[in-house]
Image (cartoon, helix red, strand yellow):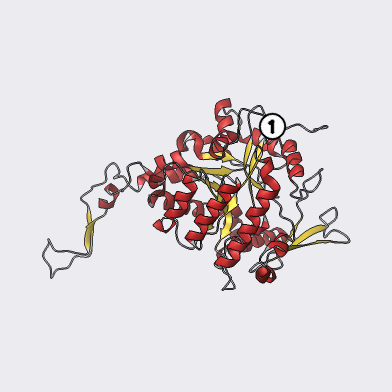
Amino acid sequence: MFKEFVASGDSHIIEPVDLFKTRLPVHLRERALWEEEFTLDEPIVPGGHTEFKKLHTIGFDGWTISKYRQTAGPTPDGEPEHILRDMNIDGVDAAVMFPNLSLFVLFTDDHELSMAHARVYNDYIVERYLRYKDRMRPTAAIPVTDVPDAVAEIERCARAGLGAILLPELPPVPYWSRHYDPIWAAAQANGMPVFFHVATGGVSVKEETSETAVTVKGLMMAVNMGKGQLTDDMVAGRTVGGGNTASAIPQGIIADLVGGGVCERFPNLHFNLVEYSAGWLVSYLGMMDRSWRTGTGQDPDWWLGFWDDTRSPKDQPTMGRLFNINAKWPWPLEPSEYVQRQIHVQFADDPTAVKARHITGLTTIMWGNDYPHAEGTFRGSAECIAENFEGVPDEDRAAILGGTLADIVGFDKSKKLAEVPEGV
């Protein structure tokens, strides 16, 4: 379907509903995440869904979604051969794979619970998907609530053959902290690029609310808005940036990694931000660099503050030069140069990100279809790519659609692997 090698930077594995109930240590099974499948006798609306999944886990008990039923095709179910079938339908040669609803329990403030779920999940993907690694690269979930345990799990997963790690977008300690240097060192030493996926981390077992619950509240707000008449404030709020298009969290991660010197200390480690869209990146790179440069016309000796008449003019501790900080950037490269060297932002449908590639740098963005999620482009990727890449030269298309990601995780981009099914 596509002339170039196409790799999705965002695809998901649908876990067995009882995976953790059957595999967690016995003393934790009562707290295991599990899913309940149920079918309605008739749809809620004519022609609508009848098959649903209900999630049972701390903080999200009862969260219910339609099963992933894409139009005119079988329901995705997580079986490797069925994933390959669906990749062929969508023209996708290879994909980096992430957990599905278990994302809600892999990164909590209960280290024992998170790590137990992560080890079960990591063992499962080795057992079930590693044989398909020429086309599917599952990411190992690594809780960061205990650094030595995280390092041990990275090394265990590397020995098992997994080639990338998944960390939470909301860590217990900010990523600028050198507290995490052993994790970065282990990932770099084992050749395992780092991925951050939206809606991960921030889950508090000890409190009724959590940061990830805010994500669910945002989704429910959209649901409720869709039920009734829109008001001006609803339209304004939605226009600011609906759901996963919000940029504050990925911008914060980038600032931590670049400003905290992580990219400088670990120059061979690649960081990938998944399901955040990428159109915001072009202005953000400019703002990062601008923050550390005295602009044209700005007086580097301009003072302000509170003057103390009781002190000497040379002893005014609450006075200072506003732009003095601009010349104190501590690292040898500019912020944007670190991003262009080591950071990559995934999008599904974002023509602005494609148009801005000459400013952000070609390798800073990569495409993905978010299979099999309803907000993704599965079964519509050909149309979406045609719209997003209209007039884009072949070389640039090839890099964004799969070439950059292939270089990061080790896919063989010289081979077209997707087979067009009969009748497609």
Task: Say which of 151 and 44 sits in front.
Answer: 151
Residue in the image at 48% along x and 59% along y? 148
Quadrant placement of the N terminus? top right
Quadrant placement of the C terminus? top right
Query: Which residue lies most toward the left here?
Result: 312
* Number of numbered discs overlaid on the protein picture: 1
Q: Amino acid at mark 1?
A: Leu
Q: Secondary structure at mark 1?
A: loop
Residue in the image at 61% along x and 27% along y? 414
Residue 275 in percent (x, y) is at 59, 48
Left or right: where 190 falls relative to 217: left
Left or right: where 79 falls relative to 323: right
Residue 227 in view:
yes
Residue 168 in view:
no
Residue 239 in percent (x, y) is at 58, 53
Residue at which label 1 appears:
417
Residue 237 in percent (x, y) is at 57, 58
Residue in the image at 42% along x and 59% along y? 179
Residue 142 in percent (x, y) is at 55, 56
Task: Say which of 73 and 160 sits in front.
Answer: 160
Query: Which residue lies most toward the right here?
Result: 41
Task: Say which of 126 and 196 sits in front.
Answer: 126
- Structural crowding at the residue carrying mark 1, measured as other residues with C-alpha within 10 Å and reported as few (<14), some (14–19) or many (≥20): some
Is 294 above or below relative to 123?
A: above
